[in-house]
Amino acid sequence: MKKRNIAVIGIFLLVFTLLTGCGADAKPKTDQTEGSKDQVAENQLTEAEASFPVTIKDATGKDVEIKQEPKRIVSLIPSNTEIVFALEKGSDMVGASTEYDDYPEEVAHLEKVAAGFELNVEKVLSLKPDLVLAHSSSLPTWESGLKQIEDSGVTVLVIEDAQSFDSVYQTIETIGKALGKTDKASEVVADMQAKLADIKKKAKEISEDQQKTVFVELQPAPKIYTIGKGTFMDEMLDTIQAKNVVEEEGYPILNEEAIIKSNPDIIIVNYSHVEDAVDQVLQRTAWKDITAIKENQVYHVNEDLISRSGPRIIEGVEELAKAIYPEVYGE
């Protein structure tokens, strides 16, 4: 009987040891699992959460600190607005500049904070923004208003007036950094660069003797503004192997005699505020001997695509290319 009891006790002790041994092993595994969950949660911080605080040197040369991800954004120029939406932060926008902020269509519901050249500072502040994206082109007019906004404790970031493809890319990356969207900004820029590379590749098919001369009309008579050397649109023409007939720098005003003498192959109308603008250009009696007029080579190109330094600028180059070289860039 004793032997049987001893055997039973032995078996009991063996089972107990095995059970407690398993229990000892189980607890560390539980702790390890919980630790792994904590680690996973830490690793799952959003890109935005991991990006702040961040300090950015803006177009004025000032270091602007953005402490946390902006959730209420006001944009003071259409190009900034388009970039915000391209970076998938449009749902955090509470205000845009004027009725000219019209893309994408979701912008229509946003509060407008300016009328013409007047910035409504009270309207901006009423929207309780945590970031205002201003633009260097409007500083001469809105500098005092922007200072009032800053003095009220709102972060203001002045974006560069981009005048080249590279500076547009930089602008997108700057806004991406400000919004905690650096990865998305890099994606947008890479897509733009790839599309521009395709445009340049096709341009190589155009020989020097096939290159067309172009006059771009930014504003009609009595003061006919155009684009000269050193401008962004001049770079666009060069990209597609087209020759700008204007030799002056910047955005000069030309008289009709100079335009007639330049005798462009193509005339591009780059404004939409005049109804039937293309027809009006074609009907100018004094221009009847210009090649572009005689051959009916006058085209309208969407000014928003060409002038807004944002993601759609490459679409503008494509539209320009199709108008000038349909045989190369046509569908």
Image: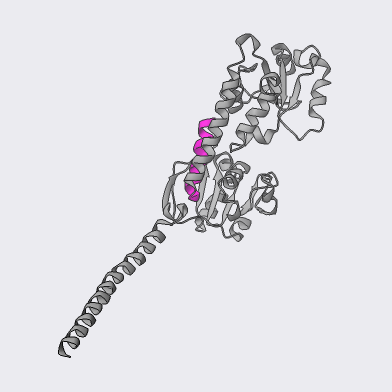
Up-down relation of residue 161 to residue 41 (above or below): above
Q: Is residue 50 left or right of residue 23?
A: right
Task: Indicate the position of residue 36 as horizontal and vertical percent values.
Answer: 36, 62
Q: Is residue 318 left or right of residue 168?
A: right
Which of the pair 174/14 is nearer the observer?
Answer: 14
Which of the pair 260/34 is nearer the observer?
Answer: 34
Task: Indicate the position of residue 133 as horizontal and vertical percent values.
Answer: 55, 48
User: Is 179 colored magenta in this rendering?
Assistant: yes
Task: Indicate the position of residue 107 as horizontal and vertical percent values.
Answer: 67, 50
Up-down relation of residue 191 to residue 231 (above or below): below
User: Is 239 colored magenta in this rendering?
Assistant: no
The reply to whether residue 249 is visible in this rendering is: no
* The C terminus sits in image quarter: top right
Residue at figure coordinates x 79%, y 11% from the top left: 289
Q: In this view, which residue lies farthest toward the front? A: 1
Magenta: predominant secondary structure element?
Answer: helix
Residue at figure coordinates x 62%, y 36% from the top left: 312
Residue at figure coordinates x 46%, y 55% from the top left: 46
Magenta range: 165-180
Which of the pair 37/300 is nearer the observer?
Answer: 37
Q: In this view, which residue lies farthest toward the top? A: 209
Residue at figure coordinates x 44%, y 46% from the top left: 56
Q: In this view, which residue lies farthest toward the bottom? A: 1
Which of the pair 306/186 is nearer the observer?
Answer: 186
